[in-house]
Every structure is written in structure tokens, then in C-alpha cells.
Amino acid sequence: MSPAYDSREKYERWHIRTCARCGRHAAKAANWSDGPICRTCYERATRDRGRCPSCGTERLLPGRDAAGTAICRDCAGISRDFFCDRCGFEGLLLGGRLCERCTLSDRLTALLDDGTGRIHPQLIPLHQLLVSLDRPKSRLIWLRNPQVPALLRDLATGTVPLTHDAIQALPNWRIAAYLRDLLMDSGVLPHLDRRLLLFERWLDQRIATTTDTEHARILQHFATWHQLRKLRAKAARSPLGTSTTQESRQQITQAGAFLVWLAARHVTLDACTQTISKPGTRRSTPPGAPHRHSCAGAWTPAGCRG
């Protein structure tokens, strides 16, 4: 409530109305020919486009006739206009009487400034892509996340290099992955398989969280020479599917569990035998315990007898 009103009653007397369109008792955003309009219905009306049934013009249809049919502002007698002062687009206007797309363009121009007052030359395609996409409102909402503007500024100023490796190392991986997709789509970064990149990031975190250094070394060897080599070969032929990378994750997870299971029994990988590791023998593991074959076998040293 504004400080200008010393009581809730005064505020409601001036601003709260029953919306003529949805029937809610809410703050009034406009007072048009069909009655008071709440903020929700106002925004919905400023996105309704089509051919006006009254005059036949293809344009914004914020008004309503007596039957409740959407009509243009001229036919509805709405005095307010909805034309952007910069590009002339008719729709929802934000600060400075600019449409959402022009507002987005200004916001991105400021964030992608390389310090010279202009957009970083390499990031111009990214700016063009983001502004050209449908539904600019979704990008404006995206920019409300404080991590997004910070990352865009870092890319523009060179704090974060424009490379796959630099973006891969960022801690806020979800935001970084989405932005990397945009950078690839706009041609700023060379195109790489998205699922392969996500798998590599997951692998780095999986190895980093393995406390036993020897286990980490073995898993890294297994992942590098078997899982990554296989995935990169497949990605070179066609985009990877979710099930392909998920299978590789499961095999690495099972391999890690197997190493922990061996360590708990004071058995080294070199001393591992099929008698120890394979269920179904007199010395088999408990049901559900990891065993050598669940770790794909290929990473097991030659000293592990089959």
C-alpha cells in the first residue's frame, strides 16, 4: 500500500474494484468501456491479437463488445494507445512506453557492453538471437535471476572467456548450460553435442567427490578410455540420446560402488577374482551387490582373473 494512504480502506476505495472480465476483487489497472480491468486481465488483453470483427483490421484486440468478443481499441473506444514509441509495435508497453522486445534489447545491450559503450563484437549474434526469439517476456523473466546478468557481464568483459572449457567450469551449471546452448545456436561457440557436454560436467563432479584418490584415478581411467571414447564416437555420427548417456552414468556409478564394496572387504582390485566378484558361487556377494561385470569389465586390470 502506498504511503499516501493512511488506511487500507482509503486504498481500497480508490484502487480496488471488481474486474469486469474475471470477476476478481483486485487492484484496477485500467477502466475501459466494459468496466474496470485488473492487472491480470489487462496484460492478457494486451497480448490478444487478431482480426477485429468490427472493422476487419489485423491488430491488437484489447477491447470487448457487448457480446464479450475481442475488438480493437478504436472500436472499443479505448483512449489509451499501445504503440511502442520506438518500433511502433502494438502491444504491452513497459517503462518508457517501450514494448517488451525493445526493453529486452536495451537490457541486453547494457549487459553485453564490453566497456566501450558497445556490445562485445563476438556477442552481437547472441544479442540478435535473444531479441528475435518469440515471447520476449520469457527472456525478461530469465534476466531477473541475478546470476544471469552477472554471467553475461563476465562474458562481455572477458572475465569468463568465450570457450566451452570456461563455461563448463562455471559453478551454476544449469544457467551455464542454457547459456551455452544459446551461444552455440547463435554461432558464437562451435556446436558440440549437448548431452555429451552435460555428461562430461557430471563426470568431473563425480570424480571430484570421490574421496579415495585411488578410486578416483581408476574411475577417471575407466571413464576416459571407455565411456568418453564411446560417447564421443557416437556423438560424431549423430546426436546422443538420453538413454545413452544415462547408461554410461550408471556404469560409472556401479564401478564406484564396486570399488567401495571391495575396499570394505580389504580386497584390492588387482587381487579381485571372479570367485569374489561374481554372484552364484560359494563366495558370492550378497544379492544386489555390485560385481565386476556390472562395471563393464573393460576397466578391470589384467591382474583381475576372470
Image: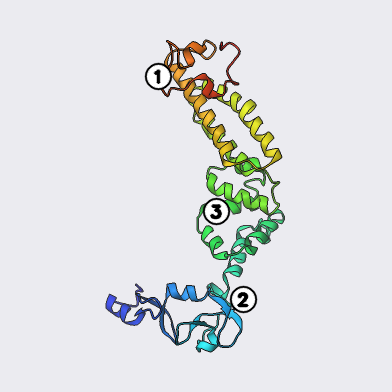
Whichever of callouts 2 and 3 sits on the residue coming sooner in the sequence is: 2
Q: Classify 4 as above or below 225.
A: below
Upstream in the sequence, badge 1 or badge 3? 3
Which residue was labeled with disc 2?
Answer: 89
Q: Give neighbour class at mark 1: few <14, some 14-19, many 20+ (Cα, 10 Å).
A: few
Using residue 110 as the reference point, say whether residue 284 is left or right of it.
left
Residue at position x 42%, y 10% in the image: 282
Residue 48 position within the rendered picture, expressed as x and y whole percent measured from the top left: 53, 75
Q: Nearer the viewer, mark 1 or mark 2?
A: 1
Q: How crowded is mark 3: few (under 14 residues within 10 Å), some or many (20 or more)?
A: some
Mark 2 surroundings within 10 Å by alpha-carbon count, few (fewer than 14), some (14 through 19), many (20 or more): some
Q: Which of 116 and 306 is in front in this view?
A: 306
Where is mark 1, residue-wise?
286
Q: Position of residue 34 (x, y in %)?
A: 43, 85
Q: What residue type is labelled 2?
A: Phe
What amino acid does circle 1 point to? Answer: Pro
Task: Say which residue appears at 66% left-offset and 59% top-offset.
Answer: 129
Label 1, label 2: how many angstroms apart (C-alpha)? 69 Å
Tag 2 or tag 1, which sits nearer the N-term? 2
- Image-quadrant location for residue 169: top right
> Which-is-in-front pick, marks 1 and 3?
1
The outermost residue toward the front is 280
| SS state under label 1 | loop
In the picture, the quarter occupied by the N terminus is: bottom left
User: Dots 2 and 3: beta carbons under 8 Å?
Assistant: no
- Disc assigned to residue 148: 3
Q: Is residue 88 above or below residue 254?
A: below
Quadrant of res 285? top left
Residue 7 appears in the figure? no
